[in-house]
Image: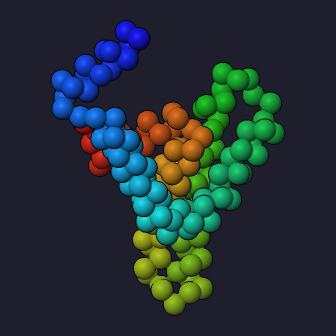
Amino acid sequence: MQQIDLYSGQLDRHGITDKDIRELKFQQSFVRVISYILGLPFFIPGVIFNFIPYYLVQYILKKSASMKNFQGSMILAAGLILFTFFYITVSVLTGIFTPIGWWAVLLPLVMYITGFTVRCISAQFNMPVSAKICALFSARTKS
C-alpha cells in the first residue's frame, strides 16, 4: 500500500497519469519496430557478408585446445585476420569479375557497416553486453 501511495504521489508531482506511461511505452516499442524494419536492408546483407568469417572464427575457437584465459585473445586475433582477409578477397574478386570495377574498393566499408548493424540489431535480442557497445556508437540520446 505504501508503494502505491508513493507511486501515485510521484505521478501527481510530475503531472502525468498511468495512461501517459502506457502510451510512452507503446511509442518506444513502435519506434523500435520501425527501426527494425528500416534496418532490415542493412541487416540482410550484413548477415550474408559476415556469415563465413564469423563462423570460421567460431570453428577455429572450438578446434583450438587453448585455455579459457586465451579465448578472448584467440577470437580477437582470428577475427582480425579472417575478416580482413575475407573483406579484401571479396572486394578484389568483385572488382575483377563484375562490371562495378573500382567501386569494389568501397565494398569492405559496406561489409563492415552492415556487419556492425547485424551486431547491434542482434544485441537487442540476446546479447546485452553488445547492446551497450552499440549504444555507445549510436546517435540516440536517452533522457
Determine the residue positioned at 38% across, 41% down. 22
Q: Where is residue 30 in the image (x, y as percent from the top left)?
A: 41, 55
Does the image show residue 111? no
Q: Quadrant of residue 66?
A: top right
Q: Quadrant of the C terminus?
A: top left
Of residues 11 and 56, the one nearer the viewer is 11
Residue sitting nearer the eye, 72 or 28 = 28
Residue at left offset 25%, top offset 19%: 9
Percent coordinates x, y for residue 16 in the rendering: 23, 34
Which quarter of the figure is the N terminus placed in? top left
Decide if residue 74 is on the left or right side of residue 30.
Answer: right
In the rendered image, residue 2, in percent from the top left (x then y), is placed at 37, 9
Total labels drawn: 0
Residue for point 56% across, 83% down:
96
Q: Which residue lies furthest to the top in this view?
A: 2
Q: In this picture, is 129 found above or below 96?
A: above
Above or below, comparing residue 46 to residue 74 in the picture? below
131 vs 33: above or below: above
Q: Residue reaching furthest bottom?
A: 99
Colour pattern of the rendering: rainbow
Q: Nearer the viewer, residue 132 or 24?
A: 24
Residue 90 appearing in the image: yes
Residue 61 lies in quadrant: top right
